[in-house]
Amino acid sequence: MSLIRDASLAPSGELKINWVQRNMPVLRGIGEDFLKEKPFAGLKIALSVHMEAKTAYLCRVLEMGGAQMFVTGSNPLSTQDDVAAAVAAGGIEVFARHGCTMEEYEDCLCRVLEPGPNIIIDDGGDLVHLMHTKYTQLIPGVIGGCEETTTGIHRLRAMARKGELRFPMVMVNEADCKHMFDNRYGTGQSVWDAIMRTTNLIVAGKRVVVSGYGWCGKGVSLRAKGLGAKVIVTETDPVRALEAVMDGYEVMPMSEAAPLGDVFVTVTGCSGVITPAHFDSMKDGAILTNAGHFDVEVDMAALEKLAVRRYDARHNIRGYVLPNGKTLFVIAEGRLVNLAAGDGHPAEIMDMSFAIQALSSRWLAQHRAELTPDVIPVPRELDEAVARRKLRAMHVSIDALTDEQAAYLGL
């Protein structure tokens, strides 16, 4: 029995799903294949990914493959209630409500696990964590799972190092057709879509501080530069910092960047990136946002405690008045800004990411007998298959190696 906000919102959600389906040709083609093959016949899939239109279409594609789907959102503020209603109206069991409490959020996660999933599709690692702590009795039925994001893979690798991971997990985020496009172009565009839509302010001429220069940070920085901002990058990795310098950005510690920034975007996957040590030195009116998976990069608990007054400055923007009289503005409570204050990545980008998810899930089902508990890279042939499908959909042709060239390269 689904748990959603309002079933009457389904027609609005269906329009959104129809739009992304039109613009996700790779996933659409995989769905057609799944209808014929039924690779998930008799299997249950538990999915926790941001509950918006692209995710809804992934759920339908997996269902086309014969899966019994149990789905929820991976962030309380990224769930779109009309999309959740449309998914439920289509017969998939969905447990997701926008703006739910953390207790309600965990309850939704539990509901998708309680039927005993065979495959887990996770975004951030919360489902896998619960499976290993609260539902250990269901682990023997798990074939394996797929992890969507960098943060989740960090958690999985830590579990694997400690010998705690009890079923195989495919690192979808590490696939080239995921991180090179989703993390760079998807995050880069969707973060600024969300910030500009929410603030109605110009980016050109502002100083933007981007914390973290991984694939996501590269994309956020590139788009900020393209919009006319002066970009400062903060990093802890010397190689990435050097790369940012050579890409033309200023690089400095956050302690030096804090007084200079007009807009801050954290995208590190770590905690405590912007702390009380930085709040006091920031400009009056500085805007703080987070594009990492969890709301721990900007120390919101400390900011709440430090502020002498808090108020809603605009929808999804909260003002925090500090003892020194300055006001800092936080978008979407410090949660994942591109989804908590926007529509997430463009459909054409998620076409590739979710194609990798779908094919990796099928690969798990096909190879279940030979897999052992570990973090597993996406097989290269899946990556290349998605890239070739995407190129065909874009009407782009490429060369092929001749037999002589392949022999020369030792392939």
Image (tube, rainbow, N blue to C red):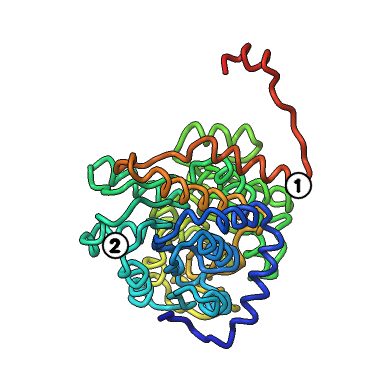
Q: Nearer the viewer, residue 3 or 103?
A: 3
Q: How many marks?
A: 2
Q: Position of residue 94 (x, y in %)?
A: 45, 74
Q: Nearer the viewer, residue 248 or 389?
A: 389
Which quadrant would residue 69 be assigned to in this image? bottom left
Q: Residues within 10 Å of mark 2 (few under 14, many from 20)?
A: some
Q: Position of residue 405 (x, y in %)?
A: 67, 15
Residue matched to label 2: 130
Residue at x-position 68% and y-position 46%:
390
Identify whether 234 is placed above or below 239.
below
Which quadrant would residue 248 be assigned to in this image? top right
Residue 117 is at least partly visible in this image = yes
Q: Is residue 297 left or right of residue 59?
A: left
* Residue 394, numbered circle: 1
How far is mark 2 from mark 1, CA to CA?
A: 40 Å
Residue at x-position 66% and y-position 40%:
388
Identify whether 145 is placed above or below 284.
above
Discs 2/1, front:
1
Residue pushed farthest front? 36
Identify residue type, mark 2: Leu
Q: Position of residue 210 (x, y in %)?
A: 56, 50
Mark 2: which secondary structure? helix
Identify whether 5 is placed above or below 77.
below
Q: Is residue 389 left or right of residue 294?
A: right
Identify whether 66 is placed above or below 182.
below
Q: Nearer the viewer, residue 408 or 326?
A: 408
Earlier along the polypeptide chain: callout 2 or callout 1? 2
Identify residue type, mark 1: Met
